[in-house]
Amino acid sequence: MAHRGIPLDTILDLMLDAVCVVDPHGRFLYVSPAFSRILGYDGEEVLGRNMIEFVHPDDRARTLETALEIMSGQPKPLFENRYLHRDGHVVHLMWSARWSDDRQVRVAVARDITARKRAEAMQAALYAMSEAAHEARALPELMACMQSHLIGLVPAAQCVLALRTDPAGDLRVEYAVDQAGHPLAHVPAAGRDFLARLADGCEARIFRDGLAAQWCGAPVGSAPGCEGVLAVMRPADGPGFSEADAELLHFVALQVATALQRLRLQQRLRQMAQFDALTGLPNRALLIDRMETAIAAARRARVRLAVLYLDVDRFKSVNDTLGHAAGDTLLQVVAQRLRASVRDADTVARLGGDEFVVLIPELRRRDDADAVADKIRTALALPVDIDGHTLQVGASIGVALWPADGEDGRALLSVADAAMYALKRRGA
């Protein structure tokens, strides 16, 4: 029927929403022109075919269940599912459908809500990525979150983050995974070249590597001289990257840059809180923490551990005669020699002034602790040249064993400290 002489087909052709008529078996009997505009199929291509063929595989069971409810007389005014466009991309549809009992057909009107769904997904993903940038405690954790959301918005086969080793250094790949999050063995040479050019200020954010791959990237920080590049890759025969993809990637790269700055600040704060600024050795707080961890391990393994408390002999004389700068240099030399005298598993800490502690976990015999103390005395007794002066110092070393001399770290430090001062008083 037409209104005042206007054919119904003309009205349907102007509709933005698709109108479909389906028989009891789910076969298309009619689709309006909007169906073709939304899904890319000509009407003649789909007539007689089952509508479920065009539904996204993950939504088919739910769609068939809803179709049965409609045929039982339950109208569905706001049912959402996903169809697959002729070119393969996903189309989100919102349906209003009812069953015509006298004609034995389902009549449905579908609205394309893909843009709305993408906007909602983008808003949620951008919020999640912004949260990750402020909460992640390490780079791998940050990038795993970023990549999981980014791939949902900009589908890609690979995601790569490369950072400079220093402000003027080369790029080094810090994170490279496929779309499932599995680590990549390597990044192709053409991809690495694109990353380097982008980091140096190249304005081309989209790059096609011949027939092999296509890349989309954004600098992490301000180019040129930025601190790195974030990039994604697709096969060359897939859908091309758009400027909208590049803009989204630019936003994510900004979040990564912000997060890196925060992680570095946190690292500096941890360094200040746990390490001695002059020597770089663990301080008292970190030493106590490591002692408690070592005691717990020794208890499980049923072994001993030793704490060596040492004071540098004649340090005050060096400070008074040559000045604090020479004293600081001497302490740095002492720290280096202490580290060289023990195993990697041992901890050397500076408590302050010229007092140091060596923690030796998993000790089998008391004689082993004495042997380490002798090795340290020998190392510290070697001459030290500072500002044209040849100095020779030594060390008084007190030893405490767990569990014989104390059950916790503070008790062991107290016993070792007392033993060290007893030796110093005797001049030993």
Image (cartoon, grey):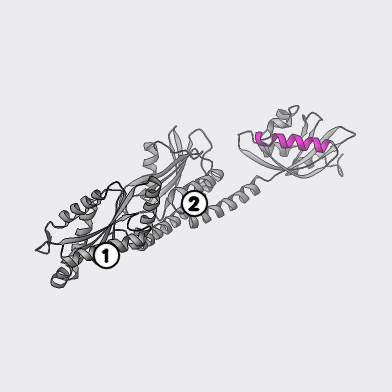
Residue 418: numbered disc: 1
Question: Which range is magenta?
Answer: 57-71
Instruction: Say which of marks 1 and 2 sits in front.
Output: 1
Rendering quarter of residue 35: top right
Q: Secondary structure at mark 1?
A: helix
Residue at x 26%, y 50% (from the top left corner) = 366
Residue 36 shows in this picture: yes
Residue farthest to the front, as pictured: 404
Residue farthest to the right, as pictured: 102
Pinpoint residue 162: horizontal percent, then vertical percent.
39, 46
Q: Which residue is mark 2?
A: 252
Q: Seen in the image, is 94 located left or right of residue 419?
A: right
Quadrant that contains the C terminus: bottom left
Quadrant that contains the N terminus: top right
Residue at x 48%, y 34% (from the top left corner) = 236
Residue 201: numbered disc: none
Measured Cα–Cα span from mark 1 to mark 2:
57 Å
Q: Are marks 1 and 2 in contact (CB under 8 Å)?
A: no
Q: Is residue 277 above or below residue 133?
A: below
Question: Is disc 2 surrounded by few (<14), some (14 to 19) or many (20+) residues within 10 Å?
Answer: many
Residue farthest to the top, as pictured: 48
